[in-house]
């Protein structure tokens, strides 16, 4: 939701002098005082026309009294003159000729010079003492300046209902005719409340007043600006282009006055209003330019509450342009500034906007939290319309999480408070109701709700909202097999999708879903349509990904691409012939390759202090999560604030790619020739309905089926897959017939958690590792086609081992960090790993960091990041209850740059690691949150993403002594074979021959993942 400016109008009414640039030279005008007031002891009432700058009261024996009066729309001022034995004289200063009249009003009027500087509490007290129900008597008392002060304070406190309740406060409406200012404040209050109909009426009424003909340029420019802004927003609500264009004319007139009279203080809101016009008329680039100007001018004036509103609006444009990550960061900046000004109304809108962005980014828990924050604030403020919108957001999240019951609860809470004229909320309600009924198998009710939502579509002006409604309705129609209506919804959506916009990807995915779910067998014409849809969508994916950083589009974009590819692969695999296998691999692995190549980038150090602050803020936030969990809402709210701060800082960042070539698309025709005679490619494809296995050898490609029983075993286990035998998953007889002795495994989704080398063979006496060398690759294509990298690499070995966890001289002050570190046992045997490396690579330069020296600063240093071989022997952190946080435990010694005690994956992704081999000799370093698009977001994958050639990680917790023994075998073999994959096989076989470590528990967890084939070779 766009935020029209909440505070500028009120502030400029009262505090113009703060903003004013040099103007015309002011002239002085003598004002004749009445004889009865010449010697003071009286209040003097001054009536005037025009714009006064200052009143000066001169006295022969006393210092002059100066009263600034840059108060717009006020034609009456009151001055109190103390009793004196000598007469006063009065002078007014102004740029323009004025007509003054001074009169004696007695001694009963309160001293207003004090009230002009009073706070809201003092003004409230004065009102209680002096305002009376007798409107006629009140009419004679306070001046327009004091009344304006009171109204402005109400605006600043967001006590808008008090301004708009004259029946309860007759003293407010009593002076509207005399001062001519109440309609302006009422209009401003309505504008803040987003009642643009009434706001427009109020500004229109002000325009019609007779005094406007002689008002100064500022007044005229301001009223026309706000009238135009209100009309544009009113027209946007009603999809009334005539009203929108009429508003633009008022803006143009205001612009001419602002430029002619150098009214620079009105420039920010002028640019904001113009940005709104360009947004609603579809020119988003022009809108962004206008907002950039508004932000720059507001920063110059140090009006950061205005900057917060403008940043929110800029984030809205980022979302509309498909730049979700930028939208998230910009919203975070906006919220940080809005918190400083304590603007609850703006915060609720910004929370809703950020929550909606999190939905699109795929972070549903964060979206739910921000919608909940918004609901809480809106209930406290009694704003039903905004409460309804946030409740609908929560229902949307609940449906996305598969919790239809919770979605129903939120929808029931929202329905009674949705007003008949709230077309956006009403259409969203019926859309979500349709999705709920489709999910709960109530097709008749789903159709009824969809029809109501579709009827209201014409009343919506936001094309993004229209597309979301239509896509949701189409998905619901497909679910209840209403194919014709789904086609209608998709064709309607296509009207609003701009060429080459990422929304087209979802459109093509849904179009294919129509055929693939409800039109079997497909006709030749339908097959051609599916092929054309996919070809067009994939072409768009490649174009978007090759011109934008993939992380600017966010996980939801990648997930939608994966859904598109999955549906197409299911279609291809419906053909039982082996010819489709090559096509499947070409589709899947070009996609998988692009995931790796696009992720091989890092945030440049765009200012050491900002970069460091961002990293430390992130680390502190993540270690807090390790202790509080998701159930502690108060702590989670503080963590969200830290996240906002991090994202606000990151908005200044720039991503730098490590890859020289990120755009190449490879073909599979000659790929099979690159295999050795003894090698087999094993490609697992885990789709929503089926799991497939494709094997490539020198003899060509073959498909093997994975039965339902095996698939159920894979999907019923949440952790590492266990309890299966090698022949249930792998074609062992085929491998034997081809004399295969090496398996290159490319896994997918849940199959990442299979410990292939530890699978028992049919003889129950041996394991896969006894018969096959096993290495994992991120994609088939990248294994045979090295990824060129621009990362700097040294020729030394770096060893990070046995960090100090719980010393008395700890440099950690964060209690959350200290809490979970207490359970960490020391890794005394990890120093044996360091000794083993020095022993077997004595000819190489080895840099070590042990004990207290194994701290965060060292791990994140260039010396360790640029090592040729990097060995890290410390605890890895992974909690299945909160899989999004993974990291490495470091020493508790005090550090100069990075927070001591913990380095998270988020921090590791902020710098490149260029080692040929990274050994993560800790627990669970191959575990992490499972992403639909890319698999497990683990430390091992993170190292590959940051430039490492290969990573040796673990699937589960391995005892310290066993790990040290394993590493001795591994490095001894690596020193002689110079091949990491072969060394890994030898080390596991040696562990098996030791009765103490025979169980796969001690050796099966270690998995080597390589970015490309050449990375297996390690030479010094």
Image (cartoon, grey):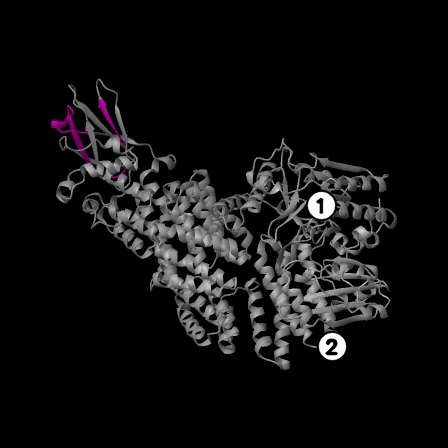
Mark carried by residue 957: none
* Residue 115 vs residue 725, the one in the foreground: 725
Would you name the residue on which mark 2 appears? 577
Which picture quadrant has residue 431? bottom left
Q: Which quadrant of the view contains residue 39?
A: top left
Q: Which residues are magenta?
A: 31-58
Residue closer to the observer: 864 or 16 = 864
Q: CA distance from mark 2 to mark 1?
A: 43 Å
Residue 45 appears in the rendering: yes
Residue 792 makes an appearance in the image: no
Residue 187 locus on image (x, y percent)? 29, 50
Task: Give the mark nearer the N terminus: 2 vs 1.
Answer: 2
Q: Which residue is mark 1?
A: 913
Q: Dividing the image into 4 quarters, which one contains the C terminus?
A: top right
Say if 711 sits above or below 267 in the image.
Answer: below
In the rendered structure, the answer to whether residue 567 lies left or right of residue 330 reads: right
Is disc 1 placed on a helix, strand or loop? loop
Q: What residue is at 45 percent from the left and 66 percent from the top?
A: 432
- Point 46% across, 74% down: residue: 442
Residue 33 part of the magenta-drawn span: yes
Q: How many marks?
A: 2
Residue 460 sits above or below residue 348 on the image: below
Residue neighbourhood size for the residue with mark 1, other residues' Cα within 10 Å, grouped as few (<14), some (14–19), many (≥20)? many
Q: Residues within 10 Å of mark 2 (few under 14, many from 20)?
A: few
Left or right of 687 in this view: 190: left
Residue most toward the right?
976
Question: Tag 2, which secondary structure?
Answer: loop
Residue furthest left in the image: 36
The location of residue 890, given as percent across then percent down, is 66, 40
């Amino acid at each position: 939701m766009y935020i029209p400016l909440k505070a500028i109008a009120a502030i400029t009414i009262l505090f113009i002098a703060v903003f004013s640039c040099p103007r015309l030279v002011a002239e002085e005008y003598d004002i004749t005082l009445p004889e009865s007031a010449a010697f003071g002891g009286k209040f003097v009432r001054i009536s005037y026309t025009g714009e006064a700058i200052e009143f000066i009261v001169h006295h022969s024996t006393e210092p002059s009294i100066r009263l600034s009066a840059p108060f717009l729309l006020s034609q009456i001022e009151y001055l109190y003159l103390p009793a004196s034995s000598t007469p006063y004289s009065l002078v007014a200063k102004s740029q323009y000729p004025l007509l003054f009249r001074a009169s004696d009003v007695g001694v009963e009027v309160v001293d207003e010079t004090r009230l002009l500087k009073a706070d809201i509490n003092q003004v409230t007290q004065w009102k209680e003492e002096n305002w009376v129900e007798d409107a006629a008597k009140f009419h004679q008392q306070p001046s327009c300046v004091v009344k304006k002060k009171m109204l402005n304070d109400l605006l600043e406190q967001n006590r808008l209902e008090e301004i708009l309740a004259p029946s309860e406060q007759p003293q407010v409406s009593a002076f509207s005719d005399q001062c001519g200012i109440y309609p302006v404040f009422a209009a401003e209050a309505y504008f803040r409340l987003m009642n643009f109909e009434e706001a427009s009426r109020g500004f229109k009424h002000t325009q019609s007043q007779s005094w406007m003909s002689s008002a100064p340029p500022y007044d005229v420019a301001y009223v026309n600006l706000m009238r135009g802004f209100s009309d544009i927003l009113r027209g946007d609500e009603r999809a009334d282009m005539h009203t929108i264009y009429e508003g633009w004319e008022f803006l143009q007139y205001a612009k001419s006055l602002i430029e002619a009279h150098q009214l620079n203080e009105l420039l920010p809101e002028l640019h904001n209003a113009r940005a709104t016009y360009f947004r609603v008329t579809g020119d988003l680039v022009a809108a962004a330019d206008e907002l950039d100007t508004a932000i720059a001018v507001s920063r110059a004036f140090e009006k950061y509450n205005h900057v917060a509103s403008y940043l929110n609006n800029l984030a809205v444009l980022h979302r509309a342009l498909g730049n979700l990550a930028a939208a998230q960061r910009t919203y975070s900046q906006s919220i940080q500034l809005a918190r400083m000004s304590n603007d609850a109304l703006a915060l609720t809108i910004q929370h809703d906007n950020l929550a909606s962005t999190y939905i699109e980014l795929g972070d549903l828990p964060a979206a739910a939290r921000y919608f909940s924050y918004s609901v809480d604030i809106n209930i406290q403020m009694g704003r039903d319309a905004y409460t309804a919108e946030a409740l609908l957001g929560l229902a949307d999240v609940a449906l996305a999480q598969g919790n239809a019951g919770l979605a129903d609860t939120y929808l029931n809470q929202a329905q009674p408070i949705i007003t008949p004229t709230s077309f956006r909320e009403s259409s969203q309600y019926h859309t979500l109701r349709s999705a709920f009924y489709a999910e709960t198998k109530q097709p008749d009710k789903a159709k009824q709700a969809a029809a109501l939502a579709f009827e209201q579509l014409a009343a919506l002006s936001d094309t993004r909202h229209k597309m979301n409604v239509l896509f949701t309705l189409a998905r619901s129609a497909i679910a209840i097999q209403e194919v014709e209506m789904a086609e209608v919804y998709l064709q309607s959506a296509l009207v609003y999708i701009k060429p080459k916009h990422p929304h087209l990807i979802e459109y093509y995915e849904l179009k294919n879903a129509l055929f693939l779910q409800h039109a079997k067998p497909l006709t030749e014409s339908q097959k051609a349509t599916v092929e054309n849809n996919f070809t067009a969508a994939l072409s768009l994916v490649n174009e978007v990904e090759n011109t934008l950083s993939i992380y600017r589009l966010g996980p939801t974009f990648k997930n939608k691409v994966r859904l598109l590819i999955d549906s197409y692969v299911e279609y291809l695999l419906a053909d039982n012939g082996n010819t489709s296998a090559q096509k499947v691999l070409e589709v899947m692995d070009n996609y998988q390759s692009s995931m790796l190549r696009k992720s091989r980038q890092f945030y440049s150090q765009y200012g050491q202090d900002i970069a460091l602050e961002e990293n430390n803020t992130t680390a502190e936030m993540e270690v807090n999560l390790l202790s509080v969990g998701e159930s502690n809402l108060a702590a989670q709210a503080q963590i969200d604030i830290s996240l906002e701060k991090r994202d606000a800082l990151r908005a200044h960042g720039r991503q730098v790619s490590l890859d020289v070539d990120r755009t190449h698309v490879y073909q599979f025709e000659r790929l099979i020739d690159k295999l050795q005679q003894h090698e087999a490619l094993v490609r697992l494809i885990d789709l929503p309905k089926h799991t497939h296995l494709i094997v490539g050898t020198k003899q060509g490609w073959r498909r093997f089926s994975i039965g339902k029983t095996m698939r159920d075993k894979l999907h019923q286990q949440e952790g590492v897959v266990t309890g299966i035998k090698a022949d249930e998953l792998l074609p062992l007889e085929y491998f034997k017939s081809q004399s295969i002795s090496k398996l290159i495994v490319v896994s997918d989704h849940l199959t990442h958690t299979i410990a292939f080398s530890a699978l028992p063979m049919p003889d129950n006496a041996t394991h896969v590792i006894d018969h096959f060398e096993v290495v994992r690759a991120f994609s088939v294509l990248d294994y045979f086609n090295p990824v060129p990298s621009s990362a700097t690499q040294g020729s030394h070995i770096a060893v990070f081992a046995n960090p100090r966890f719980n010393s008395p001289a700890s440099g950690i002050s964060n209690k959350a960090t200290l809490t979970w570190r207490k359970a960490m046992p020391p890794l005394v045997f990890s120093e044996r790993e360091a000794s083993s490396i020095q022993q077997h690579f004595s000819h190489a330069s080895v840099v070590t960091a042990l004990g207290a020296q194994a701290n965060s600063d060292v791990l994140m240093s260039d010396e360790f990041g640029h090592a040729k071989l990097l060995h890290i022997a410390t605890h890895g952190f992974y909690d299945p209850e909160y899989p999004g946080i993974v990291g490495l435990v470091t020493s508790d010694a005090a550090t100069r740059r990075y927070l001591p005690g913990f380095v998270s994956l988020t921090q590791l992704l902020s710098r490149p690691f260029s080692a040929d081999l990274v050994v993560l000799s800790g627990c669970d370093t191959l575990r992490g949150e499972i992403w639909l698009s890319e698999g497990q977001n683990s430390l091992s994958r993170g190292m590959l993403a940051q430039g490492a050639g290969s990573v040796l990680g673990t699937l589960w917790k391995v005892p310290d002594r066993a790990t040290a023994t394993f590493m001795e075998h591994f490095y001894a073999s690596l020193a002689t074979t110079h091949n990491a994959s072969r060394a890994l096989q030898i080390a596991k076989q040696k562990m098996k021959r030791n009765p103490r470590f025979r169980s796969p528990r001690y050796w099966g967890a270690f998995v080597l993942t390589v970015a490309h084939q050449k990375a297996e070779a390690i030479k010094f």
